[in-house]
Image (cartoon, coloured by chain):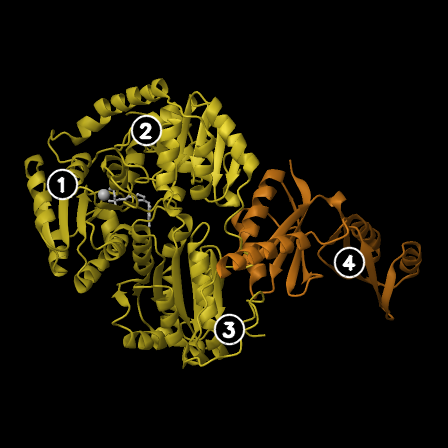
Chain colours: A yellow, B orange
Amino acid sequence: MAFSGFSDTSTPQPKKDLPRISGSEAVIRSFLEEGVETIFGYPGGAIIPVYDALYSYRDKVNHILVRHEQCAIHAAQGYARATGKTGVCIVTSGPGATNTVTGLADAMLDSTPVVLISGQVASNTLGTDAFQEINFIEITNSVTKWNCQVKRAEDIPEAIARAFYIASSGRPGPVVVDITKDAQNGLLDFEYKPKKFIRSYQPYADIDNDQISEAVRLINLARKPMALIGQGVILAGAERELQDFLEKSGIPAASTLLGLSALPSDHPLYVGMLGMHGNYAPNIKNRDCDLLIAIGMRFDDRVTGDPSKFGINAKIIHMEIDPAEINKIIYADVPVLGDVKQSLPMITERISKNDHTEWINEFRVCNNIEREDIIEPAIERRGAHLRMGEVVDAVSKEFDDAILVTDVGQQQMFASKYFRFKRTRSIITSGGLGTMGFGLPAAIGAKIGAPEREVCLFVGDGGLQMTSQELGTIFQSNVGVKIILMNNGFLGMVRQWQELFYNKRYSFTELVNPDFELLAKANRIAYRCVERHEDLDDAVREMHSTPGAFLLECRVQREENVFPMVPAGAPVHDIRLE
Amino acid sequence: MDREFIITIFSENKVGILSQVTTVFTHRNVNIESIAASPSAIEGIHKYTIMVKNDPERVANLVKQIEKKVDVLKVFCYTPNEVVLQQLALYKVKRSRNVEDMVRRHNVRILEIHDEYIVLEKTGHKEEIDELYQMLAPHGIYQFVCSGQVAIIKSRRELLDEYLKYVNAKYQRMMLQENK
Ligand SMILES: Cc1ncc(C[n+]2csc(CCOP(=O)(O)OP(=O)(O)O)c2C)c(N)n1
Ligand SMILES: [Mg+2]
């Protein structure tokens, strides 16, 4: 049996007057059926037929030629997270395919819907170590939500329909469809049926009324509850339902890194970001809570610290779409399995109206301590050197309501904590995998997905150099991203750990950097450097008023640390202010 | 504390499922003690029987991770007393009076007899197979091979039927809604 994977597919109807087209054209036409507008990709031998078909459709689909396949996935991730649609990539076999693995892993851990079409050698040469043949299915088993290999042209539409359905439903994730060259060249009678059902895959659990009742009971009883907002709220499009729930219950809410912007930063019930480098209040108060309501989040260890001490005095309600996350890290007293867009209103309807003013004041007291000890000194324009906090603050003020994209490291933590969010889908950052080099390509994808919005990327001098070849993509495709380079001459986050936990032994964390002005100029990108407090506002304004892409190099203090901080493995209430 | 579990996995008959399933074990750091694959009583559906010895909580999480695989229909996890377990072993041993006596006493099937050796088959529990091995060892075992354990649950019907019924009802509801 050739591609017999779809045994649950109903028998095909008798063929009407279907167009007879090539497998490659079927790939593109399937994309159009799924409403795809943009593809990120990179051509090569085993995918040339698809690129040839794309040439005929280039007025209907926008293809962005990246400079490295890893960045095709990251750009698709940025696109998906800015728009809520599925990101789409095409790459060739062998090295083209293996280059995507980091991107797939990132999308897997951060639940981002991405469909990747990879070329594969002709089916009669499979298994012969043919030129640019690798077993991509095997390689991607643990970094995809689903993958399949297609060896016959007639199986292409069904495989792509499955891919889009699986990538975007339930807990989203990356999907690979590996298509042999002969399948791309073969002919088929094209018919497209979007997928809505696969018997072995039930992405939405029926919500259990008993669990809802139990959750309602605990919420009504709680005296010191806290809600923990995860990206699940954004993925479910349940921002409205979240606000309704919080406003009726009066419960203070903290956010994970990926949940940021689901609730506006200035919402009266918002108390800050969770996690190792999160805000002081939601970490220190964790121990006092008597109820934690986790909404679409998975208790990453960067959020829980020592899990055995997390919410030690609290009952846990875990609202989650993925059954495998329930009881994985933190035992749930009440698991509420299902889509939070459905389950939240069921709870909101039945809880009593409440407010927790005194309890929220306890958070405010902590917020004030952090503001005085950490935030204000970090953003005030003082000291010999420019600092990351003040840069983020200045950009956030000037670019009201931009999409924040970050790379990984100190700049990521400063940006996510000091940036103010007004609406949802305004943060794009690599959370689960912590992939340096993610920022620049993700910003490209975000800007292409949401051209009407400003996209501000904060990136370190280390991270920029991991994917700086994409500056070329920015020029070729005219992508207007604003790049704020936080140049501290160090792999700063690692240096901070070396300073705090390894006796300041700065083992290979110092960077001797290239001339970033020349790098920008080489890619014909507008550039300015800022080193002094007094030039900051003007530089940020210049970046804002310059049309198109801009690289703002900020020469910041070399040895600044991110605080507060929960030491690795410690309980979150051991959060340190210095 | 580590305990023995029998995990049965029902999947679509798709190329590469076994490797998807074993990836979950390596990823979640659980060792496979034995594994057997076969068709199930339902057409087009494959069945894997995997034995593990591990911490109950970890196994419960592992089961959910396997079930999360898109082409896996359903995963069940049993303790040994919930199932009938069997395993098959072949022994190639040197011929001798002693061995032939032992064979008669132990209810072992003889598959082949040569001048120099004799091939024995034993079906039973893992302990019985080990026990026979210990007894034969002093007489010279040339070759030994043992299958993965297979299990059948003590309840009459395959539990998967219920899942398929549930899924089918869900599908019918969806189609009805769409046709409205
Ligand atoms: C691909 C990759 N390699 C290594 C790391 C480990 N790492 C985490 S943060 C960091 C330093 C980042 O330096 P830089 O980009 O300059 O940002 P900064 O922390 O200085 O703001 C490193 C090396 C990583 N997260 N990703
Ligand atoms: Mg740096």
Q: Chain of mark 2?
A: A
The residue carrying mark 1 is A398
**Residue A96 occupies which quadrant of the picture?**
bottom left
SS at circle 2: loop
As drawn, is A235 to the left or to the right of A367? right
**Dots 2, 4 in contact, CB < 8 A:** no
Q: Is residue B50 above or below residue B109?
A: above
Give the numbered dot on residue A127: 3
As drawn, is A332 to the left or to the right of A247? right
Mark whose residue sits in front, 4 or 1: 1
**Dots 3, 1 in contact, CB < 8 A:** no
Between marks 2 and 4, how big is the CA–CA gap? 64 Å
| Residue A316 can be seen in this image | yes
Look at 40% across and 31% down and name the residue there: A227
SS at circle 3: loop
- Residue type marked 1: Glu
- Residue type marked 4: Leu
SS at circle 1: helix
Give the numbered dot on residue B88: 4
**Dots 4, 1 in contact, CB < 8 A:** no
Q: Chain of mark 1?
A: A
Within-10-Å neighbours for mark 3: few <14, some 14–19, many 20+: few
Q: Is residue A548 above or below residue A1?
A: above
Looking at the picture, tell me which residue is in the foreground, A384 or B176.
Answer: B176
Give the numbered dot on residue A269: 2
Quarter of the rendering occupied by the C terminus of chain A: top left
Ligand 1 placement by image quarter? top left
Q: Are marks 1 and 2 on the same chain?
A: yes
Look at 25% across and 22% down and name the residue there: A368
Residue A565 in the image: x percent, y percent?
A: 32, 30
